[in-house]
Amino acid sequence: MQALVYHGRHDFRWEEKPAPRLQQPGDAIVRITRTTICGTDLHILNGDVPTVTPGRTLGHEGVGVIVERGSDVRNFDVGDRVLISCITSCGRCDYCRRQMYSHCTSGGWILGNKIDGTQAEMVRIPLADTSLYRLPETIDEEAAVMLSDTLPTSYECGVINGAIKPGDSVAIVGAGPIGLAALLTAQLMSPGAVIMIDPNAQRLQVAKELGATHIVDNSKDNAESAVMGLTNKMGVDVAIEAVGLPETFDICQQIIAPGGHIANIGVHGKPATLRLERLWDRNISIATRLVDTATTSTLIKTVASGALDPSRLITHRFCLNDMMKAYDAFGHAVREKAIKVIINATGC
Ligand SMILES: [Zn+2]
Ligand SMILES: [Zn+2]
């Protein structure tokens, strides 16, 4: 089969490799129908993720059809259309019992990291019963791909950890795919205002179309003074960090109101300064999390019902055989005005 294989820093190819086979009784083999590329995949190609070794098929998101299942798989049959979760979980370990599936002692984020992933014609999914989700007939498959990672990440690490309540003022720092997905899922909580902060005018325009009540271009304006101007000098009740840089985390610390919540989604590679001299008496909380995909079932229903439409994040579509073109577009997201790309195995 064909797969997107990592060979080392900045070296990746769409190439032939053997199709996956069942290894454990709990495995299922899934034929991929649609997949996508995540910002994390770009970090891997940059050499930032040491657990990914040469020869690894990348990708941790996708939708497909089960073509083979191990003898222990009970929840699914061959032919079932399934969503692949970016997090693999056993459902039994101490972390899984606490719904912290991201820290599952035999799973967690392993797909496209420690085992071969979804950017391929086929993928082996271990612990299939607790790591796959059956998709409702009515759900749009392209929208469903956003349920593997993008939506649960933004919802769990941003919206739930930010504890957004009806009427709250919310600021989201970063209008990339995750920041925009946080904007979409935040609206499920009926916030009073959502301020989007980003240095890219085009992405801010998209944010407006997706429901941001205010936009702040921090390439031109100081984010702190702009937010204070919009909130009666109070700051925001919830600040969501969706970039992963010391500077963007710092913006959250500058704009948080007393009693507020800072929710970090970004993947941080460098130390960020904690401004305790400013925050110690402000009754704030700071939350971090790796997506647990504990809300995936809920989000599937929300998307299937039409209450949430993540297909609005999709800007580009490619065929599976054009995977390298898809990487080029997603890797030059600003130039290409790309948010999420969908890669289709059928209909090409
Ligand atoms: Zn991802
Ligand atoms: Zn577990």
Image (cartoon, grey):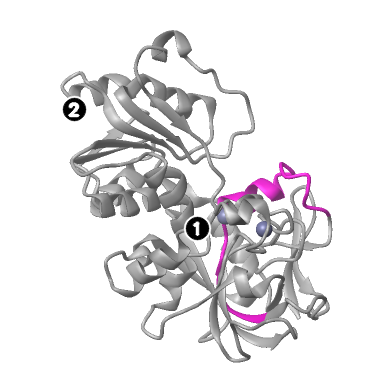
All told, the count of numbered labels is 2
Residue type at numbered disc 1:
Ala
**188 falls in the magenta region:** no
Q: Which residue is mark 2?
A: 230
Structural crowding at the residue carrying mark 1, measured as other residues with C-alpha within 10 Å and reported as few (<14), some (14–19) or many (≥20): some
Hey, which quadrant is residue 50 in on the image?
top right
Residue under label 1 = 294
Element carrying mark 1? loop
When the figure is inspected, residue 203 is found, relative to residue 146, above or below; the finding is: above
Q: Residue at x 23, y 51 (%)?
A: 211
Q: Nearer the viewer, residue 342 or 322?
A: 342
* Distance from Cα at disc 2 to Cα at disc 1: 34 Å
Ligand 1 is within 8 Å of the C-beta of the residue at disc 2: no
Residue farthest toward the left in the current orientation of the protein: 232
Asked if one can make out residue 221 in the rendered structure from this viewpoint, the answer is no
Query: Residue 54, located in which quarter of the rendered image?
Result: bottom right
Q: Which residues are magenta?
A: 30-53
